[in-house]
Amino acid sequence: MEDKVADQINIRSIQNPKIALFNDTIVVAIECRPDSEEEKNSIYAIAVIVRKLISDGISKGIFFRGAIGVGNFFADLPNDTIIGQAVSDAASWYESSNFIGCILTPRLAFVLQKHFGEGQPTARGTFIPHLISTKEGNKEMFCVNWPRAFFISSIRPAGCEEGRELQYLYKKFGECYFPKVADEKFLNTVEFFKASCVRAEKT
């Protein structure tokens, strides 16, 4: 993740992301000016970082679920503390989805469309809309398009062969023991992966 963070700092001229760990939770925060090109670049950057984290996590049998929020925040990294509106926004949603992946909170979805316009956030494949199973029922939300990492040679997970990306996902899921209650989460993830592939074929 540190290599991907460094890449995004150089490519997008963003502030150095702040990273804190809380038990099994990772918080990544980027400072930026509201209503600016920096804000737009920061949204892209956090999605690219998360995309790499999720795809590499799957390769190691670590299945991340989360959300990206927006708002003010305060960080005290020596004490692993990040608090504020952005954290609360993400925290209210990050355990809501029933799949492996990362959603954008409804508030961030508005900010995203402010920058890109209706329908445009999917143009480069970084974010895609998808009908997500949540604790509140099925809800269409913007998601980080992490399956795309399986098809990019420079960031493809180790062992994932070109042309056998879906088989690789099945292999990694098949290596993992999970209780019956988690079955739907893995099936929903496979459907999300397939939906990403279909969308990529149409663009």
Image: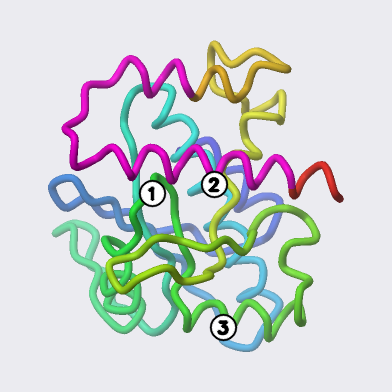
Q: Amino acid at mark 1?
A: Phe
Q: Amino acid at mark 2?
A: Phe
Residue 155 falls left or right of residue 55: right
The quarter of the image holding the N terminus is top left
Q: Nearer the viewer, mark 1 or mark 3?
A: 1
Q: Which residue is mark 3?
A: 33
Mark 2: secondary structure: helix
Figure quadrant of residue 92? bottom left
Mark closer to the chain start, 1 or 3: 3
Cα distance, mark 2 to mark 1? 8 Å
> Disc number at residue 192?
2
Establish if 57 lies above or below 161: below
Q: Residue at x 49, y 58 (%)?
A: 16
100 or 62, which lies in front? 100
Circle 1 crowding by C-alpha within 10 Å: few under 14, some 14–19, many from 20: many
Mark 1: secondary structure: loop
Q: Residue furthest right?
A: 203
The range drawn in magenta is 170-198
Q: Amino acid at mark 3?
A: Arg
The prevailing secondary structure element of the residues shown in magenta is helix
> Disc number at residue 99?
1
Q: Residue at x 33, y 24 (%)?
A: 61
